[in-house]
Image: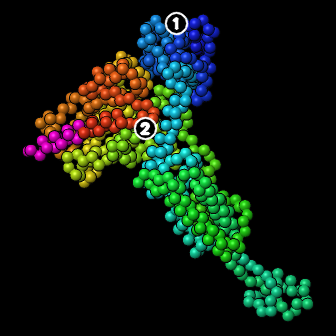
Amino acid sequence: MLDKVNLVNNRNEPSQTFTFSEDEFAFNTLNAKENCLYSIIFEGDAEDKLYIDGLDLISDSRIKRDENNKMYVSPSKVALHLYNNEKNNQSNYLPGIYRLKMVRTGKEPLYSWIKIDPKFLSNSELHQLRLDVENTIRGLARSFDANVNGTLTSYNDDLTSEDYELLAIFHREEQNFRQTLYGIRTFPKFNIAAQYRWTVKSISPLDNRSVQKMASHPAKNKQNFAKTRLINFNIPQNKLLKEQLVYVLKRVNYLIQKIENSSGLLHRKVNSQHNSFRDDLSRLKSYKDEILDFLNCSWMRNTSLKNTHEVNLLGNMNYKYIFMTKFVKKLKLAASKQTDFHRQYEYYWHRTDLLYEIWGYIQVIKSLENIGFKPIDGWIFNKGRECFDELKDGTAVTMVGDRVLSSEDHHLKIRIIYNQRISANKNVTVWTNGSHNWPDIRVDLYDASDVDGSKTLIGMLVLDTKYRRLKDVERDAWDQLASYLDQIKTSEKYAFTLKRYERAKNHSIIDFSKSIVSAVGILYPRIVSDQDDDLVQRFSGKDIIPIGLIPGNGTVDLNHFFDKQIGKLIDKVVYLTRFNNLF
């Protein structure tokens, strides 16, 4: 049977048929309006499955779960209601873009999309959410690069991402570039060229060419047509080098002009970890001066500028010339291609729920930075990163801070893990018997020793992003959140393994039968209303904590959440280590 999926408006308007493609990112989209009577009818073979993002937002007996706990529906002539006012408006799709994935036996999956146009949020506000994600990722990555590589400029809209990539290369390779130029200038490549000329006194013996030339010019009987040897710098390797330096000079001049012509850049100061744009300008001008000085040396002035096929020259180059070739390739790559995010991020732009999820993950990192932690590796914080890496399930960012854990040589280390499934296998660091085993964000907390580098798990926080109203979270997701709080566990093999916790474990002060999770945070787009305020008050004093997050409102509530929970954990460590010292 031919599979067909229709979008039906229950107000007797003509139905629309979804267009499916093997290309997940083709974004063939049908539109529906929020809080209007729309349904989906899926026709196909009995074993076919239709996965639709957001099925957890609605209640329907036809919704099933596969072996990976993913929700789908089977073919039926019965409509699947995206919104149904007969159910008292309790179950419906929220504004956003949702993916449809059709899975058929023995065939490639097909994809289509539905967009629920917002009733309360404008498209420009959703667009702002995307920009916030994009700019924040760039900004966080560049802040990390600054700490690792030295002077780097903070992200600013006056320069393009390509400009920043060029600046990063110039910063990273500055010392190598300077040393390479000095080395080549001191010991340039050359060959010995033969040159014939008429001379009274011959230095070298006459060869056949000399004899033939002299025989054809008897009038010069008192002169010899002799061969001499000269040092020749005008060789292909130096011609290529000259072309490369001219190209580098053009890139340097471009950036100098861009910075000098960008209003306010030279007067805008960034935070204490970075230098100002004046420092960038100073470095670029240093590049310019060194290149011009090199090009002005006598042997380089006499080297012609000619197109040369560098591929054929690499075998005859030393490491200094090879460095320059690689350096120019990096510059050309950065200048010629747009530094887009991984294509996965384009997917996020079309999935409002996942866009909010990745935005929430970023806010967690920013919030921890706000209270004193710094990223040291993972995702966009990997050293030597040359692109904005894909945020894959299981991606972890490690952060360290100055929070002392009861003694000066023990500090708190944090791993923020994105969308990783928790196993039911008890022989791993953390495990769960609960059916809810896939938190959006997991924050693992470690006691790290400065003495020997050892560390041990001492706590965990879970944060789940919910792109919906808080009342819907309370009604539909409470069991999930409670499962995260109560059923994620660890063992003494993986947690509290340092010697200073030994007595607390021996006296059962540390109870491994209980969950390692001390609190669950709900990240949701808070809409200020009396109803929301009442719900937040009902959560007060509990370990499942609503945290309202919307673009432009900062991370104050999230900062407070982490400050409080980390403070409680430190108090616990102080108690456990003091107990250890009593004996």
For mark 1, give the secondary structure: strand
Q: Is residue 496 left or right of residue 98?
A: left
Q: Is residue 418 visible?
A: yes
Q: CB of mark 2 within 8 Å of CB of mark 1?
A: no
In the displayed structure, would residue 154 be above or below residue 220?
Answer: above
Query: As rendered, which of 477 and 471 lies closer to the eye?
Result: 471
Q: Residue at x 43, y 8 (%)?
A: 88
Residue at numbered disc 1: 78
Query: As rendered, which of 537 and 236 lies closer to the eye?
Result: 537
- Tell me residue 76's x, y (percent): 53, 8
What label sits on residue 362 in the rendered view?
2
For mark 2, give the secondary structure: helix
Q: Residue at x 77, y 90 (%)?
A: 202
Residue range highlighted in magenta: 568-583
Q: Is residue 480 visible?
A: no
Q: Residue at x 61, y 28 (%)?
A: 26
Query: As rendered, which of 269 and 101 lies closer to the eye?
Result: 269
Q: Is residue 59 left or right of residue 495?
A: right
